[in-house]
Image (cartoon, grey):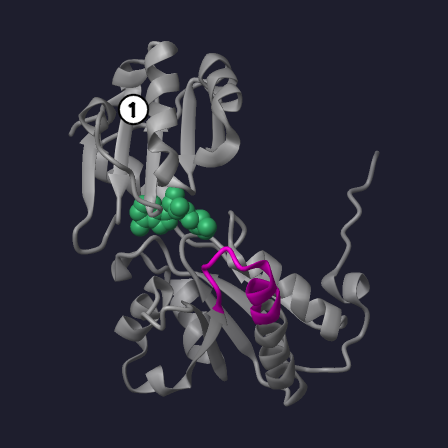
Amino acid sequence: MEQTRVVHRESLYGSTGVSGRLVGVGVGPGDPELLTVKGLRALREADEVFVPVGDTGEIGRAEAVVKEHLGEDAARIRRLLFALSDDAEARARNWINSAQEVAEALRRDANCAFATIGDPNLYSTFTYLARAVREIVPEVEVDTVPGITAMQELASRSGTVLLVGEERLALLPFTAGKSELRSSLDGFETVVCYKGGGRLDEVLEVAREAGRLEDGTYGSWLGMEGGEIVRLPEMLGREGTYLSTVIFTRGDEGGRGI
Ligand SMILES: C[S@@+](CC[C@H](N)C(=O)[O-])C[C@H]1O[C@@H](n2cnc3c(N)ncnc32)[C@H](O)[C@@H]1O
C-alpha cells in the first residue's frame, strides 16, 4: 500500500537559529466580527503585532480590526509602511525596511504576527513580506491563520450562493484584461474579480458582451462605513473603487437576494 509522506516543518526549514516565529493572520475583509477565534488568539499571543500602513499615514483596515480586539494591548501594534504610489523605488525601499524591522524583532526571539485583510494566502501583502523576511532570516518559521475573504463576505451579504454541485470558480484581478475575463465568463459558472475596481468599466463592457451583466453583484468597502452592495447593471456609468469585488454566478441557486 502506498504511504503518504508527511514533511514536517522542521525538516523543511531546518533547525532555527531564531526562536521567534512569524504568523500571517487574516483578519477578514473589514467587519471586526469576522476575525476568527484562532486569529484573535494568534494576535493576543504575539509579542509584536505588525500592521501594514499606506504612505498616506491613514490607519489601515487591518489595524482598525486589530484595535477593536486588542484594547489595552493595542500598544503592541507596530506599523509597517508600504508605499501605495507607483514609485517602484519607494515600494522596494519599504519592503526592505519592513522586512528588516520584522527580522530584528525575530532576532530578539519575539513571536511576530502580521495582520492582513482577508486571507493571508490570497493576493496578500503577507506573501511578499514573508519572502523578504526569509531572505534575511532563512531559518524563520512562518505560519498563517486563514481569514474570511471579501468574496465570502460579499456572497453572504448579497445572498449569493457561490457554487453548487460540479460548478467551478475562477478568481482574477480586474486588471487581468478583457480577453482573460471573457474566457473566464465563458468557461466558469462563477467568476470573481478582485483588485483594481478602477477598471470596472472594462468588466461591465465584457460582461454585457458575454450576456452576463445580470449575473453580477458588486460590493465595495464591505463591512465598513460607506460600503455598498448592488446588482452589477446599476454600476453602468459609475466608477468602481479599489476596494471592490464583483461576483458573477449562474443558475437558480445564485440567489442574489439584493
Ligand atoms: C490585495 S487584495 C487582498 C485580498 C484579501 N487577502 C482577501 O483574502 O480577500 C485586495 C482586494 O480584495 C478585495 N477586498 C478586500 N477587502 C474588501 C472589502 N472590504 N470590500 C470589497 N472588496 C474587498 C478588493 O477586490 C481589493 O481590491
Q: Residue at x 26, y 43 (%)?
A: 220
Q: Which residue is mark 1?
A: 216
Asked if residue 18 lies left or right of residue 67, the reply is right
Which picture quadrant has residue 200?
A: top left
> Which sits in the foreground, 37 or 153?
153
Q: On screen, 102 above or below 29?
A: below
Q: Magenta region: which residues?
A: 82-94
Q: On screen, 190 above or below 23?
A: above
Q: Of the residues shown, which amino acid type is indicated by label 1?
A: Gly
Q: On screen, 119 above or below 137?
A: above
Asked if residue 12 lies left or right of residue 210, the reply is right
At which x and y percent is residue 154? 29, 39
Q: Is residue 79 magenta?
A: no
Asked if residue 211 lies left or right of residue 2, the reply is left
At which x and y percent is residue 156? 26, 38
Asked if residue 239 lies left or right of residue 101, the reply is left
